Amino acid sequence: MSVPTHNTQPIAIIGMECRLPGADSVDAFWSNIRHGVSSLGPVSEERLNRALYYNPTVGIVNRTYTDLGGIIEYRPVDRNVCPITDEWENQYDVAHLNLCEVASRACLNARIDPRHFPVRHTGVYVGSTTSGAMGSEMVVATNLPETLKTFENIVPENLRGQKLSEHFNHLIKKISTKTRQRQFDGSPFTGANCAASLIAQVL
């Protein structure tokens, strides 16, 4: 029986950066830990409609019993730090754009210029389970007409008619005009795997 050998290849962490709730950098995050600062707080009404989703009683179906969250506020990418182009910025989800800036700052922390990365054959690995908010919005907008059609078929007959159809069409138009549309090149790119892809392209 062969004995498994352990890989003794050394690994060096040469740069770090983060953007977390209540901490826009590694130094801020470490300061929060040292001083026992909690970054949880009430979620804004813009991100949590309490009338629809909140109930302090535990166990209510389709309701959350807490309105606390750890929220990262997205902001425009700092072009002085992250060498992203207008084209890339227009094609990717805001979550991916912000992650790309964090990667650029990690390079700077390692004394590497993100505009002139010294090693081209570099792997980018990102642990991500979901797409950004844009992807979810596009899924909702795409499926809305079929969803409303199904709803129309199950409501009582006395509630159906031209007025209901007009309301549905107005709702579809309102949501569609606020949502990005998929282009022939596949953009905007919203999948979880696109986060690593964007960083690889930019850096």
Image (tube, rainbow, N blue to C red):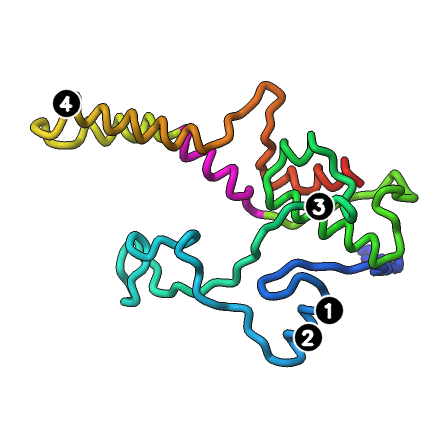
Q: In this view, does 197 lie above or below 51?
A: above
Q: Mark 2 points at which residue?
A: 31
Amino acid type, residue under disc 3 in the picture: Cys
Quarter in which the N terminus is drawn: bottom right
Does dot 3 land on a helix, a strand or a loop? helix
Q: In this view, does 21 lie above or below 144?
A: below
Amino acid type, residue under disc 1 in the picture: Asp
Q: Spatial distance from mark 1 to mark 4, Cα to Cα?
A: 60 Å
| SS majority, magenta | helix
**Residue 66 appears in which quarter of the rendering?**
bottom left
Disc number placed over residue 161 in the picture, else none: 4
Name the residue furthest top: 184
Q: Position of residue 177 (x, y in %)?
A: 43, 28
Q: Spatial distance from mark 2 to mark 1, Cα to Cα?
A: 6 Å
Amino acid type, residue under disc 4 in the picture: Gly
Please tell me which residue is depicted at 56% across the width and 55% down the height of the picture.
73
Left or right: 188 in relation to 179: right
Instruction: State yes or no: residue 155 in magenta.
Output: no
Please report contact status of discs 1 and 4: CB closer than 8 Å, yes or no. no
Please report contact status of discs 2 and 1: CB closer than 8 Å, yes or no. yes
